[in-house]
Amino acid sequence: MPVLLKGASVPAIRLESGRLLSTMDTKQAKDFLVEQAAEQAAIEGVPLADLEKRMMYFTESDPASCPDPVALNDEFEAQFETPEYEAKMFKLFEHARRRLRKDDPERSRSWDEAVSELMKGDHYILILLGLSGSPVALERPKHDFLKLVLTAVLVVAGFVLASFVAEKFNIDSRYVLWLFVALLVVAWTGFSRHARLLLSGYLARRKQR
């Protein structure tokens, strides 16, 4: 059974630029994230059973972090409801991520490194983090609706502007629209945490080839 070692340090190499270069494997990445979830649960006074911690290691493709996934899944399903567990863990992870981002930049970078490592494979914890699948009853930040509205307005305004520029300067509208789409993708990648992690995971997979 996977054992969470509280207080275990995350192996890393610090470059001259100050950036942390992760040397985590999947087990170490899960150790780090599970530790953060447990710490957040203690802060909020949320009960977190040992089996709930072990379930965060669940995967069918990595014996190093989950040696017996069938037995673990059977034990878990006999005691817990999956939808409630996924919603609970998503909230804890999201609160922990925000706390580290605000109070501990170094551990926040380690968080991103851990997630990037796990995104190379198929791990249940990615669902709990809200990065794969759709956990039930996710806690969506209050400002998300405004972000969606603003994004829609910007998209519409961008298409209108692109059409105006194309007509004004007699440019093929297709080139203007493609430029707008490219800028939109760049902006999304730059400001979206999920997009940055997806890009990081994709680049990591390419380096392995």
Image (cartoon, grey):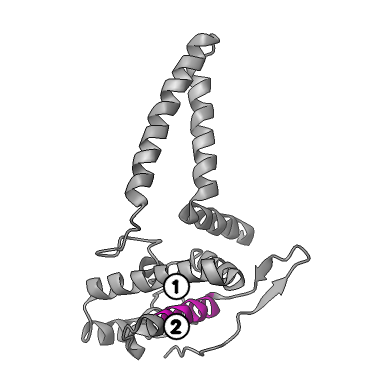
> Is residue 169 depicted above or below 97 in this figure?
above
Q: Quadrant of the N terminus?
A: bottom left
Q: Quadrant of the C terminus?
A: bottom right
Q: Quadrant of residue 104?
A: bottom right
Residue bearing mark 2: 39
Q: At which x and y percent is residue 168? A: 51, 10
Q: Residue at x 42, y 25 (%)?
A: 159
> Is residue 200 depicted above or below 88 in this figure?
above
Give the number of marks: 2
Position of 80 compared to 61: left or right? left
Q: Which residues are magenta?
A: 26-40
Q: Is residue 1 visible?
A: yes
Q: Residues within 10 Å of mark 1 (few under 14, many from 20)?
A: many
Residue bearing mark 1: 96
Q: At which x and y percent is residue 193? A: 49, 56
At label 1, the amino acid type is Ala
Q: Residue at x 56, y 57 (%)?
A: 200
Taking depth in this image into account, of 103 and 73 the one nearest to the observer is 103
At label 2, the amino acid type is Glu
Taking depth in this image into account, of 69 and 3 the one nearest to the observer is 3
Position of 78 compared to 94: left or right? left
SS at circle 1: helix
Taking depth in this image into account, of 131 and 119 the one nearest to the observer is 131
User: How far, Cα to Cα, is label 1 from label 2?
Assistant: 8 Å
- Answer yes or no: do the residues labelled 1 and 2 have beta carbons within 8 Å? yes
Q: Residue at x 48, y 70 (%)?
A: 99
Q: At which x and y percent is residue 140? A: 32, 59
